[in-house]
Image: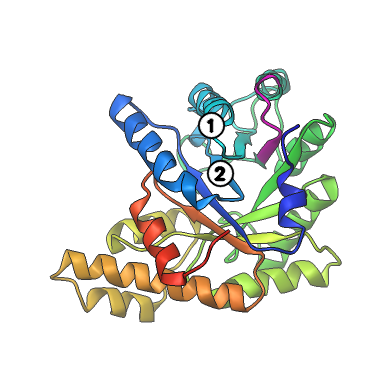
Amino acid sequence: MSQRIGDLVGQGGRSFSFEFFPPKDEVGEAQLWAAIEALEPVRPTFVSVTYGAGGSTRDTTVRITERIARETSLLPMAHLTCVGHTVAEIETVLDAYEAAGVRNVMALRGDPVAGPRAPWTPTEGGLTYAAELVELVRSRAAFDIGVAAFPEGHPSAASLDADADVLVAKAEAGARFAVTQMFFRAADYFSLVDRVRARGVDIPILPGIMPILNLAAIRRQGELIGTSVPDEIVSRIQAHADDPAAVRAEGIALAAELCEELLEGGAPGLHFYTLNRSKATLEIFSALNVTS
C-alpha cells in the first residue's frame, strides 16, 4: 500500500520534496530522468509531477507519474486540475492513477491555457473550484490530497484574507496538506500560516522554493503568478550582473538563506521546484547540510 503524504508530513519531521514537469520531447525526457536519478539518493519524502496549463499534458503527466511509481523508490504525487476536463475525464485519470498504485494527488483548479491571469471559464460538465476537485478526489478513499497555497495571494484573489478563506475551504473539503507557490520573503510564508491558523485550520503548509538562477526569467514568471522579487534580492543578484557564474552562486546562497529561515521558524519542510534539473537543488541541500 502506497504511503500517504499527509501522514508523512504530519508526523512532525522535516519533509523534503521535489517537483518535476512533464517533458515536451525525448531530449527533455532524458533530462528529467537524469534529474530523478541524481535526486533519488537524497531520499525525498515525495516527488510531484505537474499538469500543463489548460490540462495540456494530462497523458504525459499520468505516464511519468506511473513510471516513477513503478521504476523508482520515490513516492510520487500527481497533479490534477479542473481545466479542460469533464468530471468523467477526471474520474478516468483517477482510475489510471489508482491502477498504477499512485495514491497521492495534488488537486488544483489549474491555469487557463492563456495563463494564470486569464479569465477563468469552467469546462462544460466539469468543475469550477479546487475545493470541488478535492471533494471529488476525497470521495474515493484510495487517495490522499494536497492543494496549492499562495503566500502573496492568488492573482485572482480579492485580498489575502479571501485567499486564506479559499485554502481553509480546501482543507475542510478534505485536503490534508498544502504546498505554496514560490516566494522570496519568509515573512510572506509565515503570514499565510498565521492567517490559516487564525481560522482554526492546522493543515501542514510546505513552502515552495525556486532558486533565482536567471533574474529576468524569475521576474517574468513572478509577474504571471503574483510573486514579487524584493528589491534587496534584486540588488544582490544585480551586483554580479556581468558574471553569470556569480549570479548563479548568489541565487543558490539566497535560496539556502531562505530555507534556513523557514526551517528555523517552524516550517514542516521544503518543496523544491527543480525545473527538471538536479544541480541547483543538490547545491542548496549541500549549503543547508540537511537530510531527509
Compare residues 277 and 3 and report the one nearer the observer.
3
Q: Residue drawn at (58%, 73%), measured in percent from left and top?
A: 262
Q: Residue drawn at (31%, 56%), measured in percent from left and top?
A: 217
Q: What type is the residue that disc 2 sits on?
A: Val
Q: What type is the residue that disc 1 sits on?
A: Ile
Q: Residue drawn at (35%, 67%), measured in percent from left and top?
A: 252
Check residue 47 in the rendering and tell me which mark sits there, or answer none. 2
Q: Alpha-carbon neighbours of circle 2 within 10 Å: few (<14), some, or many (≥20)?
A: many
Q: Residue drawn at (72%, 35%), measured in percent from left and top?
A: 2
Residue 117 place in picture, x, y as percent? 50, 49
38 left or right of 133 in image? left
Q: Secondary structure at mark 2?
A: strand
36 left or right of 110 in image? left
Q: Is residue 102 magenta?
A: yes
Regarding residue 25, the answer to whether it shows in the image is yes
- Where 32 falls versus 291 (above or below)? above
Compare residues 24 and 76 and report the one nearer the observer.
76
Regarding residue 185, the answer to whether it shows in the image is no
Q: Is residue 227 magenta?
A: no
- Where 180 falls versus 251 (above or below)? above
Q: Which residue is mark 1?
A: 68
Which region is colored magenta? Answer: 99-106
Q: Quadrant for the N terminus, please.
A: top right
- Whether the residues at callouts 2 and 1 have beta carbons within 8 Å, the answer is yes
